[in-house]
Image (spheres, rainbow, N blue to C red):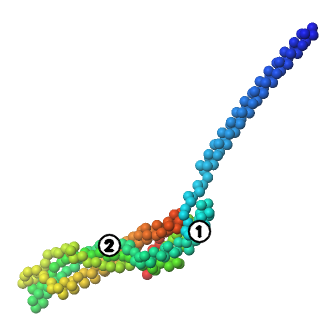
Amino acid sequence: MENKEELKQMIEESVKSAVSKSLMKNTLRNNFLKILAYIGILAALFFMYQSLKPKTPEAIEPVEDHDVTLENNGIFGFTVADFEEPILGEATRQQLLIVDEQEVSVATTISDAGLFNWSIFAKVKNETIYGTGVYTIDLTKIKKSDISLNEDTYTVTIHVPYPELHLVNFDPSKTKIGDTEKGWLAFGDIKLTPEQTKAFEEEAVEKLTVALNGQDCFEKAARFTKLTAYELYQPIINTVSPAYKVEIIVDPKS
């Protein structure tokens, strides 16, 4: 009888032990799965954070004596003084900047009054003359007050002077000669003396200058001034900091 009780007790203890081990195993497995789930969630959140956080600007070479630590942290800290010297210094290298060249044509005439200045001996020839105007700006007119800095948009603004018509070139080789109108007693073609040729060329330059001083020509030159000045100064700005861009404002015509 005692043996049966001992056997029964052993069986009960064995069953309890097996159940306990099974429950422990399930608990460990559940805890392990939970840990893996937490790790997966943390990894997803980390990668999401990395993709959304602002990128730090690349380190740049600062101007001499400038704070490289601030720049590498994305806080550039430049002042307008950092840009003034290289901008204003460009005037020592080239005083005048050619911003535009335009070709124009003008209809004109040359005449020969003929014998006794009578119309019956007169001869008139129609011609079209061609020339080129060169527009420039004077870089020495740019002062410190013409340079400003916007640290929020990383923009350097430069006011440049309105373009001027600097040079007018008359090109006789492009002249188009029309028919000669003659009085009924006029014969032959018009022949100019050296003095008359010189006077004609001077008059041609005057007429071309009037055409090149037209409003349309200056408006076009002003547009090219903005582009040409940008191409000149943006590389200069980059030598100070490639993070900044230049904005060119052409002052009104005085």
Q: 252 or 99: which is nearer to us?
A: 99
Q: Amino acid at mark 1?
A: His
The correct choice, above or below, for 112 with respect to 102 in the image is below
Q: Position of residue 169 (x, y in %)?
A: 28, 78
Rendered-image quadrant of the C terminus: bottom left
**Is the residue 33 above or below the residue 250 in the image?**
above
Which residue is labeled 2 in the image? 102
Residue 35, relative to residue 164: is it above or below?
Answer: above
Which residue is nearer to you in this view: 164 or 127?
A: 164
Residue 42 visible in the current orientation = yes
Q: Which residue is at 38% across, 79% downward?
A: 164
Residue 82 picture location, percent across and down: 55, 72
Measured Cα–Cα span from mark 2 to mark 1: 44 Å
Q: Secondary structure at mark 2?
A: strand
Residue in view at x 83 percent, y 18 percent: 14
Residue 66 shows which numbered tag? 1
Residue at the front extreme of this rendering: 65
Residue at far right of view: 2
Using the rendered view, name the quadrant where residue 198 is placed. bottom left
Looking at the rendered structure, the kind of residue marked 2 is Gln
Pick the residue in front: 161 or 239.
239
Left/right of residue 66 with respect to residue 167 in the rendered view? right
Relative placement, left or right, of 65 versus 109 is right
